[in-house]
Image (cartoon, rainbow, N blue to C red):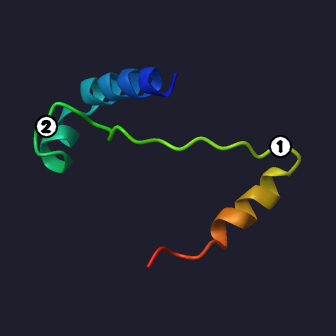
Amino acid sequence: LIGNIKTVSSRLIRKEFPWLATKYFYGLPYFWTGAYFVASCGGVTVEQLKNYVEHQEQPK
């Protein structure tokens, strides 16, 4: 599912903003990396989730 979303969004972005690939991705034939992250956050409000994300420690 994630792979399909990334493929379709990459095609749409390249079609609408072709200059992005040249300027930011060195003309390579991909837009996204192969990595992705999925998590569940049931039982919390959007505000609680936003607060959690905003107050995480930065990687060192």
* Location of mark 2 (residue): 28
- Check disc 2 and give the amino acid type: Leu
Determine the secondary structure under disc 2.
Answer: loop
Which quarter of the figure is the C terminus placed in? bottom left
Q: Which mark is residue 2?
A: none
Pair 1/2: label in front: 1
Residue 6 image position (x, y, % from top left): 41, 29
Identify which residue is drawn at 11% across, 45% down: 26
Is 58 rendered above or below residue 27? below
Direction from residue 51 to residue 4 in the image, left or right: left
Identify which residue is drawn at 52% across, 21% down: 1
Residue 32 image position (x, y, % from top left): 33, 38
Identify which residue is drawn at 75% across, 57% down: 49
Is 26 rendered above or below residue 47? above
Mark before the other along the chain sequence, 1 or 2: 2
Determine the secondary structure under disc 1.
Answer: loop
Direction from residue 46 to residue 31 in the image, left or right: left
